[in-house]
Image (cartoon, coloured by chain):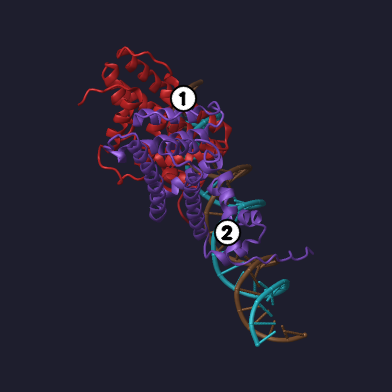
Chain colours: A red, B purple, C brown, D cyan
Amino acid sequence: MTPRRPQVRVGGEARRAALIEATLDLIAEGGSEAATVRAIAVRAGVTPGLIRHYFTTKEDLIAAAHEALMTSLTEASAASLDRLPDDPLARLAGFIAASVSAPVTDPRAVSLWSASMQQVARDPSMRSVHQATYLAFRDRLEGLIRDALHVKGRSVVDSRALAIAGNALLDGLWIEAGALPDHFAPGELKTIAINSFESLLQIEFAKD
Amino acid sequence: MTPRRPQVRVGGEARRAALIEATLDLIAEGGSEAATVRAIAVRAGVTPGLIRHYFTTKEDLIAAAHEALMTSLTEASAASLDRLPDDPLARLAGFIAASVSAPVTDPRAVSLWSASMQQVARDPSMRSVHQATYLAFRDRLEGLIRDALHVKGRSVVDSRALAIAGNALLDGLWIEAGALPDHFAPGELKTIAINSFESLLQIEFAKD
DNA sequence: GCTGCAATTATACACTTGCATAATTGCCGA
DNA sequence: TCGGCAATTATGCAAGTGTATAATTGCAGC
């Protein structure tokens, strides 16, 4: 007769967040199929039934986890801006560098992101979350670009196109860094990103 | 008493390829978890047991499907080069345009690619296949860049960096086109890609 | 025509999955 | 202090999973 597992009461938002965190951990490590209800429960130190108490269905939990991931990525990006200087050129350069360096360039994040991309392709609600996050990042980049060009006295012809291209460039480098972490020399991607933006915007950043 | 299903004997490589194709279809439509043994069998018009006759395990089949996908992508890229003109500048422009237009920019392909990215993160053999495919594409792009710069009489300082940046740019645009197909005006991404390469390489393509 | 063998179907099994439902437990307010 | 109620655990179930094994079928070579 195995004794009943003692309850550890947490309740409310904390437990909910713990379940989401466990879900993301499992997906990052083993893909969507690894995130079974039972595995999530074990990871969160909880009984499977409890999940049903916080999420009416597993699909619910997955969606919540996806949204949490996206907002955390967005917030990480916003937070990096807070630590940057005021000079528009240096701000843009710092933002670019942060986007292709650790901790943003993290295999776990890339794995989670690619896992979510699949579901984005077929779940409209996930697609709208993805689109909102994508646009938030791109709009931030576009603002930085406009400021940088303005301080150089340059007329901004099509900042939308520049932001799309710059965003694509950062995305591509970010993915490659995550997928083939050993393939690039340290700092190589950062240099490439900075140089590429100099070409795209036809400006020059101050050398550090 | 349901009658026994009539056999349709195919045998050998054809049936094997059909099973792989059914697997890829299902993964593209519903993610890895949709590719169950039974679903694959139905899709291929076959009985589940037959799969075991061609692949000793399901993992075997998945790996074979991944390799088939990668080689097909590589071959598609190589084939597009065959249809391009000889002039190096036009060749590069055509290659860029093809990389961000249909049929390369295909939701199915993007979905399959992101599905494989996940497994790349944790399966070393899949990672080596991914790396080989990535390098094949990038090397092709680097060659086109070198040719284009050479015909302009420009010294090629760091074609590796240019190829990495260009590849990242194309990847990023390709992914966004696949993830948010309705978000961009027709031809917008193509224009952005061409203009961006003009900036990156500091050249000008002939207007078409 | 027969026979042997590979290709194919059929059936079965043990295990996992998500979910429902009932039983317990701890805590908070009266 | 003692109900009451939300948080938690326990148990069970029907459906789906991969795989093993046996039974059939068609075809190729003699």
Q: Which one is nearer the viewer's eye here, B187 or A54? A: B187
Side (left or right) of B82 relative to B18: left
Residue denoted by label 2: B17
Residue B203 appears anywhere in the view: yes
Q: Do the residues labelled 1 and 2 touch (CB within 8 Å)?
A: no
Q: Quadrant of the N terminus of chain B?
A: bottom right
Disc 2 residue type (three-letter)? Ala
Q: Is residue A47 visible?
A: no
Which chain hosts label 1? A
Q: Kindly indicate the quadrant of the structure image that contains residue B163.
A: top left
SS class of the residue under badge 2?
A: helix
Seen in the image, is A183 located left or right of residue A56? left
Compared with A147, A110 (above or below) is below
Nearest to viewer (mark 1 / mark 2):
2
Q: How many labels does the image show?
A: 2
Q: Nearer the viewer, residue A207 or B91?
A: B91
Q: Which chain carries label 2?
A: B
Instruction: Determine the residue positioned at 38% across, 23% down.
Output: A141
Closer to the camera in the image, B73 or B32: B73
Mark 1 to mark 2: distance in Å? 40 Å
Residue nearest the observer in this picture, B125 or B15:
B15
Residue B120 pos. (x, y %): 42, 49
Instruction: Give the x, y percent position of residue A195.
Output: 29, 30
What residue is rendered at 78% in x and 65% in y? B3
Q: Name the residue under label 1.
A: A135
| Side of B161 where B117 appears, left or right | right
Q: Is residue B142 found left or right of B39 in the rendered image?
A: left
Which residue is drawn at the image coordinates 57% and 61% (left, top)? B16
- Look at label 1 and name its amino acid: Leu
Position in image of residue B54 (x %, y %): 56, 65
